[in-house]
Amino acid sequence: MNARLILKQLPNHLLFRILHYSLISQQLREDLGMGVGAAERLNGGPKGLKGMKGSAARPMEWQPFALWLANLLLSYAGDILGNMLLGTLPLEPLCNASDVLLSSAIWYIIFFCPFDLGHTVASTMSFRLVATAMATISQVQLIERGVHMAGKLYGQAPIPMLIVGTVMGSGAELLKPVACILINRCQHSHLAYIKLTMNSKLALGLSCLFMLQIYHSPLILGLSRHQLLVYTLVLTTTFKFLSMAYSTEHFIWLLEHRMQYTFFGGLSGDLSKFFGRVPKGSVRPTWAFSEFD
């Protein structure tokens, strides 16, 4: 029981919040193409920087309020969208002023720290490993809480539980188009399109597991709610570490591409094109299969 309470309170710890907000801000900056050398690329190299005459040369210094608001939405995206689906106040997570100030301070350090120290530290592999582990704990617990709350509210209907769990576990991906609108980069960025990313697919799979636990399905081998939470934390963290080290997401994407080709029109379309080239008459012209020779 004590272990369960400790695990439940971990995402609210100050260190967890700092790492979570740092990871969100770092991902937003990388998605916008604002790396350490972005200023030199956009301004024509070091000569362009020297010609600024002491003015701000870094590209991330434009529209700071829009960047801050976009970062704030992405940091609380899961809670905001989850509250909307569960019929509670969407902006209730923003009522904690101290937490919002902490998020804003981390955003400022990642984007505007002198000499890009915040961005440089957040880009290291050691920091990413620790931050990813902390963020995974928060994500899994958020999905688990969303599935159980949706089960109570919607009478354990499977579709609402899956939707709420997936949205709460991958809210940042769903609000990225809104963030692009705020910073006026929709016409220049692929983030303006809602995509089911690997993180969203992982959230959907975890939602299915927690839903099966609510139904006491034999597929989860009789695991209790707390046991399933612990096992999913370990497996999800291991999967993310493998994705960072060995790019396992690439193999999953290839598998999905093959499944999409086989079951969702690709194979049938190619077969139709292939058999459509065979003439109906008894005499077959010599050019019928010229492209396949």
Image (cartoon, rainbow, N blue to C red):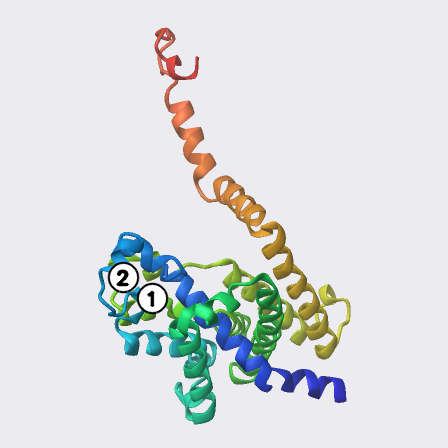
Give SS at disc 1: helix
Residue found at x 41% / y 67% = 28
Residue toward you, 105 or 163: 105
Residue 190 coordinates in the image, percent (x, y)? 34, 56
> Residue at the spot x=57%, y=49% of the render?
252
Query: Which quadrant does the C terminus fall into?
Result: top left
Between residue 40 and residue 264, name the one nearer to us. 40
Q: Which mark is residue 164?
A: none
Q: Amino acid at mark 2?
A: Cys
User: Residue drawn at (32%, 60%), measured in percent from left and top?
Assistant: 39
Q: Closest to the observer: 217 or 243? A: 243
Q: Residues within 10 Å of mark 1 (few under 14, many from 20)?
A: many
Question: Which residue was labeled with disc 1?
Answer: 177
Residue 89, quarter of picture:
bottom left
Q: Does residue 175 appear left or right of residue 139 in this picture?
A: left
156 and 241: which is toward the camera: 241
* Residues marked 2 and 1 touching at CB (< 8 Å): yes
Asked if residue 48 can be seen in this view, the reply is: yes
Q: Position of residue 192 (x, y in %)?
A: 32, 61
Which residue, given by chain and number where applicable, does mark 2 sit on?
186
Residue at the (41%, 69%) spot, across then down? 115
Q: Is residue 37 above or below residue 224?
A: above
Q: Position of residue 84 (x, y in %)?
A: 41, 82
